[in-house]
């Protein structure tokens, strides 16, 4: 059974705008993936998605965990980040049309955080705002059939992937198939669905916009619960995606300065490197610009330098 929603003029307007922006990104960047964008946006995605769920770690702490640096914080929060890093490193391996793959992703995401990760819930659940219940999920006995129906829709719908991905995201929030991790799985799987058609979504962190105004996100979900259809949430998520694409284009069009380049290179966590390694990342700069960058990094205490000329070796100060 097809989940209930309508395709209205507002949705069609966003689909058109998003299609144009994806075309611009593909024409300019997809064949030459920007490592700065990929690395930074993976960190933003993980930080933002977990922040929505109450994780207290900062973006810098997420970066440090990704680079195997020691971080002081709640062990649960640190484990959530480590699990998310593992999952997002495997994005291309998940099959968006497979419930088995979906359950495996949840198993990785919630490993050691809940009992029986990767298994559908066998208990009733509700979502509370303080003492007030805001959403009562369907009975546990219905979850398996609802999830099978949702994946049938995913496999057979002829609607655009943009719409299908939004519907799937909403339905996961509505069905609440797991005891925990439903929100992050809805957001993750929307990315997985979109990546199949548009690989560029591997590095578009729409979660960041959601985390900036969580109230709007939850209001859209609540409005759909009240109406009994996901139209409002589709509009909301398409607006988020459209704005996220704007930010990707703006990032790519900006001019990086020496500090931008140094900060990004340091975030990669290379212990020891030469100037040519630096230029392999920043392919558009000259050797003299690379030398000036690295000299500044040494002066600022970010790097140490040993050797001379073509035997020069740099190390990151930790």
Image (cartoon, helix red, strand yellow):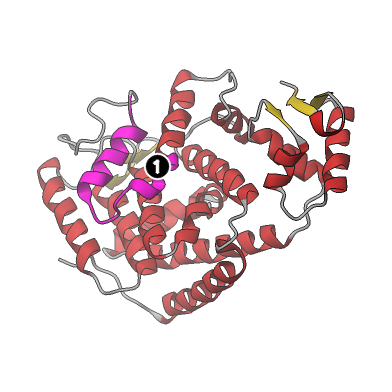
Which residue appears farthest toward the front when viewing the image?
Answer: 310
Question: What range of the chain is rendered magenta?
Answer: 88-111
Q: Position of residue 175 (x, y in %)?
A: 24, 49
Residue 12 in view of the camera: yes
In the rendered image, which residue does mark 1 sit on? 90
Q: Position of residue 161 (x, y in %)?
A: 35, 67
Image position of 25 with respect to 33: above or below? below
Q: Quadrant of residue 129?
A: top left
User: Does residue 89 show up magenta in the picture?
Assistant: yes
Query: Is most of the magenta stretch helix, strand or loop?
Result: helix
Residue 31 horizontal side relative to residue 102, left or right: right
Taking depth in this image into account, of 4 and 161 the one nearest to the observer is 161
Residue 299 horizontal side relative to residue 80, left or right: right
Taking depth in this image into account, of 245 and 133 the one nearest to the observer is 245
Image position of 146 with respect to 60: above or below? below
Q: Position of residue 48 (x, y in %)?
A: 53, 43
Residue at (15%, 54%) from the top-left corner?
148
Q: Position of residue 31 (x, y in %)?
A: 56, 63
Q: Can you say which quadrant of the picture contains the C terminus?
A: top right
Q: Quadrant of residue 7?
A: bottom left
Taking depth in this image into account, of 238 and 92 the one nearest to the observer is 92
Mark 1 neighbour density, 10 Å: few (under 14) some (14–19) many (20 or more): few
Residue at (46%, 66%) from the top-left corner?
238
Q: Can you say which quadrant of the picture contains the N terminus?
A: bottom left
């Amino acid at each position: 059974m097809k989940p209930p929603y309508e395709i209205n003029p507002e949705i069609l307007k966003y689909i058109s705008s998003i299609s144009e922006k994806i075309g611009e990104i593909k024409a300019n960047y997809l064949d030459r993936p920007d490592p700065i964008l990929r690395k930074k946006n993976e960190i933003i995605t993980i930080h933002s998605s977990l922040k929505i769920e109450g994780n207290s770690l900062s973006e810098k702490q997420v970066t440090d965990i990704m680079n195997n640096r020691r971080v002081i914080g709640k062990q649960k929060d640190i484990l959530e980040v480590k699990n998310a890093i593992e999952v997002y490193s495997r994005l291309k391996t998940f099959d968006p049309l497979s419930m088995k793959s979906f359950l495996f992703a949840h198993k990785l995401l919630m490993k050691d955080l809940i009992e029986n990760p990767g298994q559908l819930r066998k208990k009733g659940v509700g979502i509370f705002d303080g003492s007030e219940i805001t959403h009562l999920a369907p009975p546990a006995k219905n979850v398996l059939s609802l999830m099978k129906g949702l994946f049938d829709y995913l496999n057979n719908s002829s609607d655009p992937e943009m719409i299908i991905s939004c519907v799937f995201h909403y339905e996961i929030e509505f069905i609440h198939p797991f005891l925990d991790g439903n929100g992050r799985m809805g957001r993750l799987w929307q990315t997985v669905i979109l990546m199949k058609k548009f690989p560029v979504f591997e590095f578009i962190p729409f979660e960041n916009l959601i985390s900036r105004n969580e109230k709007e996100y939850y209001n859209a979900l609540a409005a759909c619960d009240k109406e009994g259809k996901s139209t409002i949430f589709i509009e909301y998520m398409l607006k988020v995606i459209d704005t996220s694409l704007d930010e990707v284009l703006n990032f790519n069009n900006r001019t990086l300065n020496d500090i931008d380049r140094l900060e990004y290179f340091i975030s990669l966590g290379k212990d020891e490197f030469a100037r040519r390694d630096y230029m392999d990342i920043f392919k558009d700069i000259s050797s003299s610009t690379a030398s000036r960058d690295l000299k500044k990094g040494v002066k600022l205490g970010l790097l140490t330098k040993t050797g001379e000329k073509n035997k020069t070796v740099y190390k990151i100060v930790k």
